[in-house]
Image (cartoon, helix red, strand yellow):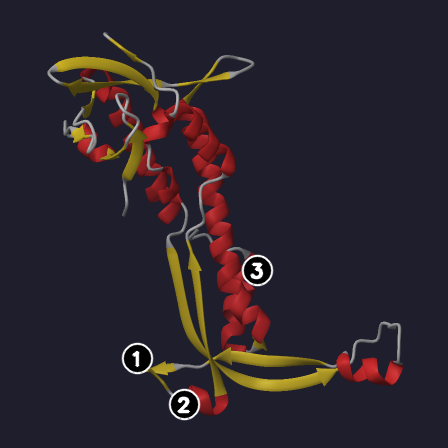
């Protein structure tokens, strides 16, 4: 996560000089998505390495022994290690990115590729606006310029993703098939 | 950070919430329906403790 790729460095340098608004907003989300993917692939490898035994052509779950006491009688059951690990904690819990941008340029253009239908009408509808923007600098924790006056305030919030369906199914199946024994 | 998991009570099927660090500390978790007490067997402390250490290391490396 801490390793900056060339694209990240380009992004950082563009913050002060200006870039398209889409790029400014999407870059932190892309970085978060990449970090999440790294964590999830690490988690998948962890599950294979520690929660399963490799039997050559198949995997079998590593079992742990649990005990439960009821009415003074002690019984035991085996449970796959996978079912007791707090696995979903490896995903990004919550990300709150707040920044203000200063719009540096506005350009409008009509894409050159041909469209079907009324050309005059579609020309108006196809008109695209591109906003050039850079981060609005902060001074003493406050934005130098009033963002509502000449800039845009951007707040991005991303929340935790649920566990992969395969893992959830595995845990569910294992949990529903607990068989107790005397030893 | 939430480290709570849920397991079905082996006696009555009622969900029991438990914390893995609590299990490793020797804590018992009771079923609210039938009062069965759930704990980690002494034979499994090693494997669960070792796995949790690796798990914490993985989380720490992901956070760097």
Nearer the N terminus, badge 1 or badge 3? 3
Rate crowding at label 3 as few (under 14), some (14 to 19) or many (20 or more) other CA atoms within 10 Å. Answer: few
Question: Residue B24: where, in percent of width, then height?
Answer: 19, 28
Nearest the camera: A152 or B59?
A152
User: Does residue A83 sit above or below A62 in this rendering?
Assistant: below
Residue A50: give its label: none
Residue at (46% x, 48% y) in the render: A36
Q: Secondary structure at mark 2?
A: loop
Give the Cα distance between marks 3 and 2: 30 Å
Label 3 vs label 2, nearer the camera: 2
Rate crowding at label 2 as few (under 14), some (14 to 19) or many (20 or more) other CA atoms within 10 Å. Answer: some
Q: Chain of mark 1?
A: A
Label 1 vs label 3, nearer the camera: 1
In the rendered structure, the answer to whether residue A175 lies left or right of residue A9 reads left
The residue at which mark 3 appears reads as A7
The residue at which mark 2 appears reads as A146
The residue at which mark 1 appears reads as A141
Residue at (39% x, 20% y) in the render: A177
Residue B64 in sight from this viewpoint: no
Q: For residue A127, what is the image quadrant?
A: bottom right
Nearest the camera: A155 or B36?
B36
Q: Chain of mark 3?
A: A
User: Does residue B32 sit above or below B1 in this rendering?
Assistant: above
Q: For residue B21, what is the image quadrant?
A: top left
């Amino acid at each position: 996560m801490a390793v900056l790729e060339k694209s990240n460095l380009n992004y950082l340098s563009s913050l002060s000089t200006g870039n398209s608004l889409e790029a400014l907003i999407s870059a932190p989300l892309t970085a978060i998505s990449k970090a999440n993917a790294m964590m999830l692939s690490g988690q998948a490898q962890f599950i294979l390495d520690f929660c399963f035994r490799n039997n050559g052509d198949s995997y079998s779950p590593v079992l742990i022994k649990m005990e439960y006491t009821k009415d003074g009688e002690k019984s035991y059951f085996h449970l796959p290690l996978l079912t007791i690990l707090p696995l979903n904690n490896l995903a990004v819990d919550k990300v709150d990115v707040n920044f203000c941008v200063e719009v540096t340029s506005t350009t409008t253009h009509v894409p050159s590729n041909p469209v079907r239908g009324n050309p005059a009408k579609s020309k108006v509808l196809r008109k695209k606006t591109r906003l050039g923007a850079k981060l609005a600098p902060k001074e003493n924790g406050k934005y130098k310029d009033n963002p509502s006056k000449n800039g845009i305030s951007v707040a991005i919030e991303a929340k935790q993703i649920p566990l992969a369906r395969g893992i959830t199914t595995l845990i569910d199946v294992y949990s529903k098939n607990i068989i107790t024994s005397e030893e | 950070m939430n480290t709570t998991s849920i397991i079905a009570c082996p006696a009555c099927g009622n969900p029991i919430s438990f914390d893995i660090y609590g299990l490793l500390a020797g804590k018992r978790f009771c079923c609210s329906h039938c009062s069965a007490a759930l704990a980690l067997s002494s034979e499994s402390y090693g494997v669960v403790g070792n796995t949790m250490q690796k798990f914490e290391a993985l989380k720490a490396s992901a956070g760097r």
